[in-house]
Amino acid sequence: MINIGKYVNTHGIKGEIKLISNFSRKDLAFQKDNKIYIDNKEFIIDSYRVHKKFDMLKLKDINNINDIEYLKNKDVYITSIDTEYLIEDFSNYKVVYNNIEYEILEIIENKLYKIIKTDNKLIPINENFIDKIDSENKKIYVKYMEGLWK
């Protein structure tokens, strides 16, 4: 199971739920008809939207606040996601640049980009900088670029 957030409240009387989520692939997880799990109970996403800092989910067959409110403050999970990697996975990886390994200290994310912060070095996570991702050995190989890290 992959944790995608926490159900923190409801919105309105029809049972729409508010999630707090830092999940990196919301675009894949919060799709209509995807299954989510709260306290080992399966639900199907009917719609998704963002409201202020919350991810808002309307779930199929939940039409009343009383049908879902008892699960408030529980974590929300999915069983799988169709992607090559998740940003969350990188926390245990090493970055390899010019045959030198670096520790990942932090992954910085905003709406436009994701950056890996190593020992005072920043690496954008995109095809222009990443040569390959070795999931087996938990290494991210960065393309050599003249003058990138002097």
Image (cartoon, rainbow, N blue to C red):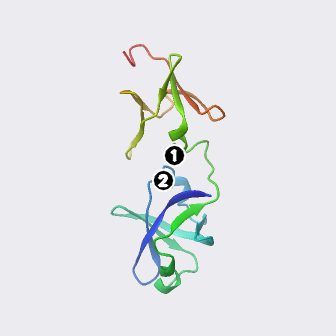
Three-letter code, disc 1: Glu
Front residue of 73 and 141: 73
Q: Residue at x 47, y 64 (%)?
A: 6
Q: CA distance from mark 2 to mark 1?
A: 8 Å
Work out whether 146 lies above or below 19: above
Work out whether 75 lies above or below 10: above
Work out whether 81 lies above or below 60: above
Q: Residue at x 64, y 31 (%)?
A: 137
- Whether residues under marks 2 and 1 lie with C-beta atoms below 8 angstroms apart, the answer is yes
Q: Tell me where residue 43 appears, x and y as whole percent.
A: 60, 72
Residue position for label 2: 23
Image quadrant holding the N terminus, namely bottom right
How packed mark 2 is, by other alpha carbons closer than 10 Å (few <14, some 14-19, many 20 or more), is some
Outermost residue, right side: 136
Q: Tell me where residue 131 appears, x and y as whole percent.
A: 55, 25
Three-letter code, disc 2: Phe
Residue 88: which disc?
1
Image quadrant holding the C terminus, namely top left
